[in-house]
Image (cartoon, rainbow, N blue to C red):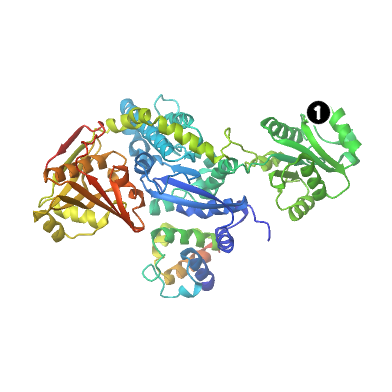
Amino acid sequence: MDKLKLVADVSLAEIKDVLSGFERGSLEPLKISVLRNIMMEPARPYYEYLGLLCGLNVEVMYGEYDNIFMEGAGGREDLLNENTDCVGVFACLADMSPLISNSFASLNADEVEKEIHRIGEFINAVVNGIRKQTGAMILWHGFERPLHPSMGVLDYSMPGGQSVSVDFLNDGLKRSLRNIQNAYYVSMDDIKASLGAERFYDRRMWSMGKIPYSREGLMTIACEDFRFIRALKGKNKKLLVLDCDNTLWGGVIGEDGIGGIKIGQTFPGSTFYEFQQVALDLYNRGVILALCSKNNEDDVWEVFRNHPDMVLTEEHVSAHRINWEDKPSNIRGIAEELNIGLDSIVYADDSEFEVNFVSRLLPEVQTVLLPAARPADYSVALLSGGLFDTLTVSAEDKGRGRMYKAEADRKKLQSEIGDVGEYLKSLEMEVSVLPADKVTIPRIAQLTQKTNQFNLTTKRYSETDIQRFADSDESDVLCLRLQDRFSDYGIIGAAIIVCSGQEAQIDTFLLSCRALGRGVEDVFLNACLDRCRSRDARTVGGKYIQTRKNMQVSGFYRRKGFEELSSNGSETSYRLEMNNAQREVSGHFKSVIVEL
Amino acid sequence: MKDRIKGVLAKVFEVGTDEINETSSPDTVETWESLSHLNMIMALEEEFGVRLTEEQMINMMDFESVVKTVEDAVADNG
């Protein structure tokens, strides 16, 4: 098979061709889950292709649009679980804080500080929430500085400018991530800088489809994410094999002699000097260095030992093949000598012939063609792929992921009161549960028709149906209303209880996704159980009917203490004995009103 | 050019090239919806090396208009 081209050299169409033609099932899986308030699906092929390049079968699952809090802090089992390898978070500021993003000039210092604090609490709740659900590596993409700051040229000089505020937000984000193992900050500003804002953004795609970035932008983001992913999977390269002539110095030692080669602190030797510094830096990071050069050994060592401007010395070189044999055989020899796999090796050379030769015979070796006419670009050529990136914690051992999760679980109570609890309290939520009436029945019917995710049975009813349930003595229709400091969300939950004798059955139990992650479901379930109790019911039955969209509530009744009675795969029945003690509801609501 | 466009659309909407024809639109192609419409635009821009305006992007609501828009855009590029 032809070696796959680097993602920057291949078009989306080619990527799709390669992906559809490749049998990926046998590769090691890598599951990426994405929480987001923007559309990032167009980036999926890039992640899949980058995965292919390092032997991984990448599957990307996107959370619901603008459900970061609901899924991260509230929970979503099918998206965040022990099989998840990586969680990407894209929390764009325009959506997280329209105030800071679009109305900055209208805010006073107090209001800005409040917003920054609110977002900080949000981030804490979500980061901790994700970690409670999965030990996966978290990649949270930082906020982007505004292209044209609100305060214009004064922005950086003022204590409270817009760009400064974004910096504060990112500082808070970094702090939150540092408190958790295996969670990393991805600098979107750096990615933007590498492309330039005009190439990074696509304003048409933003206005038409909430995709902020251009194809190139999406690709570059995927590449950056993959630096972390490769490191996570231990795919980082461990050995750098270097050519000598026109790589470590300008010129050919065999012809120019030690006095004629270019290596020094002034031009033209300075570019090679800087390149050697890059190699030495890699050495100090833990990368192994080796030489592979077509030369007489003595000539090369003479430079290493006697040239005053060499940065690298003999002691930095762990192995060498300096002879007139072919490079592929030599590199294979080095690999065997050092007991390093070919797929952990990078070979850097300015010669297209040698690079192609090695590439052809040793396809597992990553080759870097240094641009012969532009030695000043050598460093970028070697470093830009992030080939040597490691994470400080090696997460190769999945057991570690579980250890982090266990730790998080143990700290669960603490963090619930600390971070999530505080944030939820600050929302000043007011919940009311009411029986359905003329006014609310249309909305309730609408909810049964439109709600897909937090819907236990997904039964679709018309207004007439709801009216019938409400009128009948044998059934009750309840609805839940929510408001908080920021908004009145109206009726966002509906439940239908059907009673026969001493057995109550929850026919319908649903919540709009806006209600999730706030503990509202507990209030609602409690109210339903209270209603059953007041009807003298001895047992309450509930059903979970699986659909493509409601997997996140598959364990709901189980979690709330119901006993599983039976299951036929897509339908599971539960029951609860009513003599169970009154359940506790978290105290973070400003008020809870239940009118039955 | 029509065939090239058919190929791009078939790939984006994940259908056979024989399923894309003069009558194709979001009504007849199940996978042609708002997000894949934007993917189609990105793919066409990459394939033909053009950059479409927002107005052009909105006007490409069936196969015929896609072809017309792309042909115009390529011609404008000179």
Residue type beneath disc 1: Asp
Locate the N terminus of chain A by quadrant.
Answer: bottom right
Element type at marker 1?
loop
Determine crowd level at label 1: few under 14, some 14-19, many 20+ residues with C-alpha closer than 10 A.
some
Coordinates of residue A182 in the picture (x, y in percent): 51, 35
Furthest residue in direction top, as rendered: A159
Q: Is residue A431 above or below residue A222?
A: above
Q: Is residue A433 above or below residue A280?
A: below
Left or right, A482 with reference to A551: left
Residue A572 in sight: yes
Residue A103: which quarter of the image? Answer: top left
Please give the count of numbered marks on the rendered protein: 1
Coordinates of residue A396 in the picture (x, y in percent): 58, 40
What residue is shown at x 29% (from left), y 47% (from top)? A563
Left or right, A157 with reference to A50: left
Coordinates of residue A549 in the picture (x, y in percent): 35, 55
Left or right, A134 with reference to A548: right
Pinpoint the chain carrying mark 1: A
Front residue (pair A455, A200): A455
Q: Which residue has dot 1 on it?
A: A309
Front residue (pair A62, B53): A62
What residue is shown at x 57% (from left), y 54% (from top)? A49
Left or right, A213 with reference to A413: right
Q: Is residue B29 above or below residue A437?
A: below
